[in-house]
Image: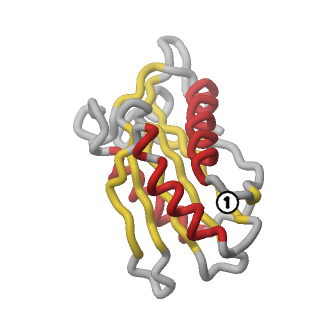
Amino acid sequence: MKIKPGVLAVAVPLVVTVLAGCGTTDEGSGVPFAGTRTSKDAADDLEGVSSGVRDLIGVRGKVPGSGATVTECSGRDPDKYFRILHPWSFYPASASDLDDAMQHLKERLPKQGWKIVEYGPDTSRNKNVVLTADNDGLKAGVHIIRMAKDDPPMLSVDVVSGCYQAPDGQEVDHF
């Protein structure tokens, strides 16, 4: 899977900011507390959330294999607290389907409990369309960029969890 470093550099902080609006927050960080889980279980859960987002796209295309990764909860012990990030890309079977995919997400995410907090062109030269949403119930956020001028055209998707705590007596498995 190709992930452009610049995309993650922009997307992850935006998703982190979006999640600040979700439910109960982790002491002063603005990130919602997602509960106590092992990092593997939390990653499996978030990959399920990603799968649900993929299902809402509603057009044929390819999603190269990717896995979730463990990231830190800002200002917290990285051996005890963690977040999960699952970045992936969607390449429509036809470039003309890219707009349909983005429109489906805009219409369908709210019906699945997501609150869209940003939608529209970014400030880049390409004026990529950005959709950012969070889901209080899932303690997750999603940041989607429609990159119509890329070759090939694609959606860049980052799904991120709230802050988890490792179970008592266990440390975070960083992967």
Which residue sits at x=53%, y=56%? 104
On screen, residue 56 versus residue 18, left or right, reads right
Element marked by disc 1: strand
Of 111 and 84, the residue lying toward us: 111
Residue 122: x %, y % from top left: 41, 75
Residue 34: x %, y % from top left: 41, 28
Which residue sits at x=43%, y=41%? 111
Residue 132: x %, y % from top left: 41, 56
- Give the number of marks: 1
Of 37 and 139, the residue lying toward us: 139
**Relative vertical location of residue 51 with respect to residue 118 in this rendering, above or below:** above
Of 15 and 127, the residue lying toward us: 127
Quadrant of image for the C terminus = top right
The answer to which quarter of the image holds residue 49 is top right
Quadrant of image for the N terminus = bottom right
Of 107 and 72, the residue lying toward us: 107
Q: Residues within 10 Å of mark 1 (few under 14, many from 20)?
A: many
Which residue sits at x=67%, y=60%? 90
Which residue sits at x=56%, y=45%? 53
On screen, residue 74 versus residue 170, left or right, reads left
Residue 50: x %, y % from top left: 59, 42
> Residue at label 1?
90
